[in-house]
Amino acid sequence: MVFSVWDCFVGKNLFSSLHNDDRKMKNGCITFCSRSFALESVSRRETAVQGQTTATSYRYKQIKTKKHQMKDEPTNEELKNRNRELENELFLYKTIIENVPISVFAKDVQDEYRYIIWNKELETVFGTKSEQIIGIHDYQLFEKKEEADYFRNYDISVMNGKKIVDIPNEDLRTADGVKIVHTRKIPIYDENNQPKILLGCLEDVTQKIQTEQALKNSERKLIELNADKDRFISILAHDLRNPFNTLLGFSDLLLKNIRHYDIEKIEKQLTLINKTAHNTYNLLDDLLLWIKSQSGKLPYEPQKIVFQEICNQIIISLKPNASSKNIEIKLFEREKIILTADINMFKTVLRNLITNAIKFTNENGQIQIYTEKNHTKAIITVSDNGIGIDKENQIKLWKLSQQYTTSGTAEEKGTGLGLILCKEFVERHGGKIWVESELGKGSDFKFTMPFCND
């Protein structure tokens, strides 16, 4: 056996340093070596049997050339360049996320859905800085557990669904109060199809929703005003015109035949003329009040008033109407009630409700007026045992556009305008008005008025 070292091969390409016969070798340690390697040291070993060389092998130590270093282990300069590229990419990514005009957040699914992104736009919407949010989860963000439960369960369902979820309108409690937001949640999975990040985009649509609602309210108000206008014209054209036909007709007839009619017939026609004139005056008075109320020109001057005194005045003024149908009006007041109200508006409300009760109560009927206290307001009730109102028509009482008028038990006519005025005047005082009625069993009209604080 012979073993020797060839120092002259050190640093040279392995294949270029071999004998031509050796270069043809396809197997063994030489053939798997890349041409990009050189020899640092090499030795040759020959094996002889009976004086003949039967095998030759080489032992060598590899060193990597510059070409190989570029492929497997980047140089320091290359590492620096790559770091700069990564820093630029990271800066670009952060700049885009921070300045995009929509709120962006991200949660780490693997770490209890903790926030890892919270951009500037979201800081503005939510009223909370990113430094306070990054690293916490919803159970630390929201005070109420049910709110955190809602968002956590929604997030889990989004990740399980593996698709983008759009949430049009969602209430979000912020530092500035509850806002309405439009949210889009995007599940992100890694290359192994494992849940990684929940990305969210959020838009504050509070102003948009409020504007849309305001437009709808304005549209509805315009429709109501247009209907009110039509109803008002109808009142002028029919309800106000027809009484004048009666007045003119009977007065002309009376003038032509005054020397031929007996005293009883003359008295009967004069009574009819007088009654029609009073009704027409009351209607005209209501119309003028309604016009002033709609235009904002009706003065509102609340003062301290004693309910019993005002109520007795109105009962006395309406006694002739009630007496004509033999209707008894009773006032029940458990304790003295002192209100804060505009006296003219209050009188209009009470007078209209009692007048209606007389109108729809049968002869020999009874009307009761009573009060009760409810915290800071008094509840005043005008109750009758008249014909009553069915459920379907009760709603129509308070809208001028939905005309609902019926003749009284003595064929008295009306326009329904009185109740509209009652509603507006009661609401002007911060109260409410409603009716409790059953067809054939009478009606209870109730309204609230504020107590006097003194």
Image (cartoon, rainbow, N blue to C red):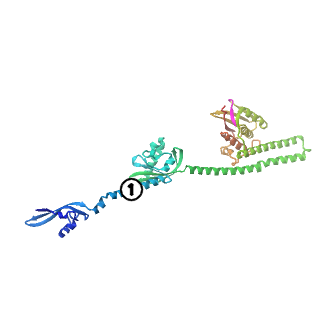
| 399 lies above or below 384 | below
Identity of the residue drawn at 40% across and 53% down: 189
Return the residue nearer the eye: 66 or 271: 66
Residue 386, given in percent of the width and then of the height, sits at 71, 39
Residue 326 included in the magenta stretch of the image: no
Residue 416 appearing in the image? no
Return the residue nearer the eye: 355 or 45: 45
Residue 137, given in percent of the width and then of the height, sits at 44, 45
Residue 316: which quarter of the image?
top right
Identity of the residue drawn at 30% across and 61% down: 70
Residue 350: which quarter of the image?
top right
Within 10 Å of disc 1 (Cα), the crowding (few <14, some 14-19, many 20+) is few
- Looking at the image, the residue that sits furthest to the bottom is 20
> Label 1 sits on what residue type?
Leu
| 94 lies above or below 420 | below
- Looking at the image, the residue that sits furthest to the right is 259
Residue 335 included in the magenta stretch of the image: yes
Regarding mark 1 in the picture, which secondary structure is present there?
helix
Residue 356, given in percent of the width and then of the height, sits at 73, 40
Query: Which quarter shows the N terminus?
Result: bottom left
Identity of the residue drawn at 48% across and 50% down: 120
Residue 303, given in percent of the width and then of the height, sits at 70, 35
Query: Which quarter shows the C terminus?
Result: top right
Residue 211 appearing in the image? yes
140 sits left or right of 296 in the view: left
| 10 lies above or below 246 | below
436 sits left or right of 267 in the view: left
Return the residue nearer the eye: 227 or 173: 173
Residue corresponding to mark 1: 86
Q: Report the span colored magenta.
A: 334-341
